[in-house]
Amino acid sequence: MNSPVDMVVRIVAAGNLVRGDEIRATIQLYPNRIIYRGGELIAARVYAPEGQGPAAEQAVVSFLRDVNEAASAKGILPDPIRGTVGVIEGQSSMALVQELMAHTGNVVLRLCGGRYGCDGSPAPALQGRK
């Protein structure tokens, strides 16, 4: 079977199986396309000092939820089990919370597309006054 466009094939098993069991799965086809170019802004939010301190972790979680919604709406395929896109390690997430708490003024939290985002690092970037 030929297609005039490159396709992404996702095969999702209906459940966990024991070796030898019949596999029930769905096959999903999606056109393969670039969703975000390197450095393209995915999401940006301004957080005021009131949103920092004890609320810094909640601010980061909320921002990542916004990123997930924006990326899914634009066409990034979510994980079929969790329904989320992308991965941020716990250590990176906590470092982001710590950096957010170190700022005293308004902070812009940004995430850009590509292997290296807005500021050349693979994690969300902060811009504000410490």
Image: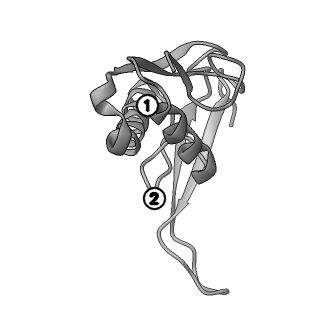
Report the amino acid beneath label 2: Ile
Q: Secondary structure at mark 2?
A: loop
Mark 2 = which residue? 81
Q: Residue at x 63, y 13 (%)?
A: 39
Q: Is residue 4 left or right of residue 63?
A: right
Q: CA distance from mark 1 to mark 2?
A: 18 Å
x and y percentages locating residue 76 in the rendered image:
51, 32
Nearer the viewer's eye, disc 1 or disc 2? 1
Answer above or below: position of 47 versus 64: above
x and y percentages locating residue 55 in the rendered image:
32, 42
x and y percentages locating residue 24 in the rendered image:
51, 70
Answer above or below: position of 17 versus 109: below
x and y percentages locating residue 65 in the rendered image:
38, 38
Mark 1 = which residue? 67
Which residue is at the front of the view, 43 or 107? 107
Q: Which mark is residue 22?
A: none
Which residue is at the front of the view, 34 or 104? 104
Q: Quadrant of the N terminus?
A: top right
